[in-house]
Amino acid sequence: MTVFERHRLTPWLLLAPQLVIVVLFFFWPAFASLRQAFYVQDAFGLGERFVGLANFERVLATAEYWRAAGVTLIFSIAVAAGAMGLALLFAVLADRVLRGSKLYRVLLTWPYAVAPAVAGLLWLFMFDPVLGVLSHGLALIGVHWNVHLDPTQALLLVVIASVWQQMSYNFVFFLAGLQMIPASLLEAAAIDGAGPFKRFATITLPLLSPTAFFLLVMNTVYVLFETFATIDNTTLSGPGGATRTLVYKLYEDGFVARDLGSSSAQSVLLMALVGLLTVVQFRYIERQVQY
Amino acid sequence: MRFNRLLSALILATAPLATPVYAATTITWWHAMEGVLGDKVNEIADAFNASQDQYVVKPVYKGSYSDNLTATIAAFRANKAPAITQVFEVGTATMMSAKGAIYPVHELMQDTDTPFDPNAFLPAVKSYYTSADGHMLSMPFNSSTPVLYYNKDAFKKAGIDAPPKTWSELGDDARTLVERGASECGLTTAWPSWTQLENFSAINDLPFATKANGFNGTDTRLVFNQQPETVAHIQQLADWQKTHAFEYGGRGDDGTKRFQSGRCAMLTTSSASQAGIKDASAGNFEFAIAPMPFDQDAISQPKNSIIGGASLWVMKGQRDEVYKGVARFLNFVASPEVQADWASFTGYVPITTAAFERLKQQGFYDKTPGADVAINQLTRGTPNDNGRGLRLGNMPQIRNIIADALENAFNGRDSVPEALDNAAKRGNAQLTQFQQSVGQ
Amino acid sequence: MRYSRPGLDRLTHVILVLGVLVFGLPVWLALTASTHSAGALQSGVAPLWFGDEGLANYWQLLSEPISGLGVSALRLLLNSLIMALGIAVGKIAISLLAAYAIVFFRFPCRTLCFWLIFVTLMLPIEVRIVPTYSVVARFGLIDTYAGMILPLIASATATFLLRQSFMSLPQELIEAARLDGAGPMRFLKDFVIPLSRTNLAALFVIMFLYGWNQYLWPLLAANSPEHATAVISLKNFVQATDTLPPWQLATAMAVLTILPPVAVIIAFQRFFVRGLTDLDK
């Protein structure tokens, strides 16, 4: 691919803006976080003490950290299952219809443009104990909606708001994936007498599996980071920590408790987790590109 | 590394674009007063700015109390701290221990030759912001205390004549209200840790933490879980929860909505919520204000309650000229005129005796029934070790931990003693960490 | 390929329409609530149909300073626009040059440079927010548009995507350029950019949405209401301590906040879909 071999300075000039910004605003702060993980410091940064791995031990020894890990896992599975399931259903249907396919696509993708903070606000409004349409609807069928007390309802609320947001993202990918499946394959199967459901199970689904795998990783990353704004606008991690994700805990320890050592240690653990996900995804991408 | 320096210089070159230039000395004031309270803050600053032409106070709304503290700390670490910042009462220990970051108000007043009398403030307010050696470190601004709001229409419907004085009376009333169909729920609360643990302890003369709730040293530990009366109180709330005699309304002030909508007939929350509740319930029902109930098994004469709200802290790192203006402005804020106006508008209590007297003279308490409940409750008796307030490091996080525990107790995940023991254990880890981080 | 089965077709449409309605409900309710008065809202369940306030709440937000913030919604939306455009244009500009260098030049440490940039790919700003604030403040950029924008363009997503896109440019064209003897700048201007126009447009749409919807960083970096964005201003409405949230204004502000990005996604649907599927892998 290389075109210009004899230019010595040009590539550096081209790279300079990106490199400088990344070094100043990414590596510098990231290394500061890394260093902080081995120190205990007061909130105002007036003094600090090296403590080795004590911060990591402190984090990993608390039951709350593992509870947050568990909540994050359940949250991820629920969002991935909900958002991908619905997205696949709508994508298959939108791919089927002859008329209005484009319109459906537009009408099902716009929630992607809504900020997670706004999504939180919208659902908070619908479940408001006084005004909420949904909390009143539930009261009619005898369900007392109280996200301040019921851990299942609270988790359900943030899952619903996240699925609402994330479905459109998955939908776009599934629809694109469906449209890339060669018509000849499906026609051949139809000639062999396979019905629509059999064709879906034996041809469509296997061909969509790389997309599904990619989306699984992206949904996990979404739950890890983006849902912070959703939780912060709805349940504030309650009740009793039932909706406290790893990032929310990191934020609480860092910004509410101002325990910089502990939150930095959690940052490092999270960086390792995301690094792992990146490698997994990168291998997947490289494989895709070779096809 | 010449090229790196060049780029730093390039970036720095864009900075002056954002720095405004004023003729008068600018004093930045970061606060957490949203909505109409924020407008009132701007009004106070405008009045001060109009009263002289040497200084311009510029109030900046920085989000919630917690957001503002976060922003203040981050800004201080980057040498960009505002001259004045508003910190909620539970952030007091954090601010007090940051000796290199704050400019104690008593020193500021002395250094700038500004007249300042700490005894002008109400004892319960003054003690909260006074260090162990008797110096006032921050300037009280907005103080409130929890009171009991009750729905008069629902009480009438249930045939109850007077508001409950004790928790056992309240329990009976709550059950009666629900059983007679006068309301769907008896009691709800906002800020549960503040109303049901912190103030319950103070009013009933029970320790919340050792070392006089932290006033006598950072080696304090939580002991609310070891007080049988406190545990029994949370237990009765958990029991009432099953029959809707009590409904938990969240760790913030969402419980207020359950009262405003008429669902719950009683509410414990800040005295400063009065205006908001009045607005929302107008036309729906009549309500009144009563003192917080006490526990007659623990005490025969209830003690004073403790304050919530915030005070103004002066940050280091400004020019002397700025501090002269800060001293003048703080004096202005504490003046009876400003305080009386602020208190009558917001429902916060007047923080000085002079402001209280002024409001009395103006006939405010005659015109506004119930407005004196808070200040009377706050000023009864002399604050003792259990009633001066709380001075615990990482207190905002400890409140979250307590809210976690209450939620887990009320939804049945843990038993009440289990939940409170766990909260004390987690909270004590916070206190240990704080003690270490401030090097004591 | 699609076989017409009347029963199945009808069911398909029914489910799709249901889906569209359910997904539109939250915004519909915000839209209707925003046309009611505060009093009308507080007296009962959120209304499903428009109220008699018309656009009065919107007009109030846009023309008067918002209570507690001191600036109008117009200013907030303008700030959001500046931030979103700054992030989109800035990120594309620096990424275009960097990806161009990595793909079309051979120089020492090329792989190292690629990895240095690549490491930033998925690590969001949330995990390094405290030190980032210190760095930005050290350069005096707190409460400036530059300070709000720069840390958010310090990530490699766009570089990586453009690298993918450049690597898939047809080999013949590159050969043609080589025979033509075009210099680096002309090759970029006359060949690479025109051929990547669709991808650049797609990237722009995605980055615009990303910039517009930022939450935690602008909250810290914008110290004064003069720089606050629409998304972070919403907190001012719902976090009402001691007062009921003014839902009629909160919902109107929510509608104003989502209008621009939703308009972008609908208007540039083709680029948006392409941006996600062709580039975001």
Image (cartoon, helix red, strand yellow):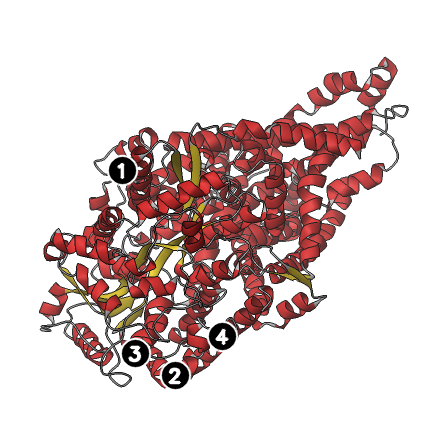
Q: Earlier in the sequence, mark 2 or mark 3?
A: 3
SS for tag 4? loop
**Residue receiving disc 3:** B204
How far, Cα to Cα, is label 2 from label 3? 11 Å
Q: Residues within 10 Å of mark 4 (few under 14, many from 20)?
A: many
CB atoms of marks 2 and 1 within 8 Å: no
Q: Quadrant of residue B375?
A: bottom left
Question: What is the x, y in percent for residue C103?
Answer: 80, 31
Asked whether, in this view, residue B76 is left or right of residue B37, the answer is right
For label 2, the residue is: B227
Q: Tag 3's secondary structure?
A: loop
Assess whether mark 1 and mark 4 are in contact (beta carbons under 8 angstroms): no
- Identify residue type, mark 4: Thr
Discs 2/1, front: 2
Q: Nearer the viewer, residue C210 or C232?
A: C232
Quarter the N terminus of chain A occupies: top right
User: What is the three-letter code of the residue carrying label 1?
Assistant: Thr
Where is residue B213? Give x, y as percent.
42, 73
Give the residue type at disc 3: Asn
* Of marks 2 and 3, the one in the foreground: 3
Numbered tag placed on residue B220 in the rendering = 4
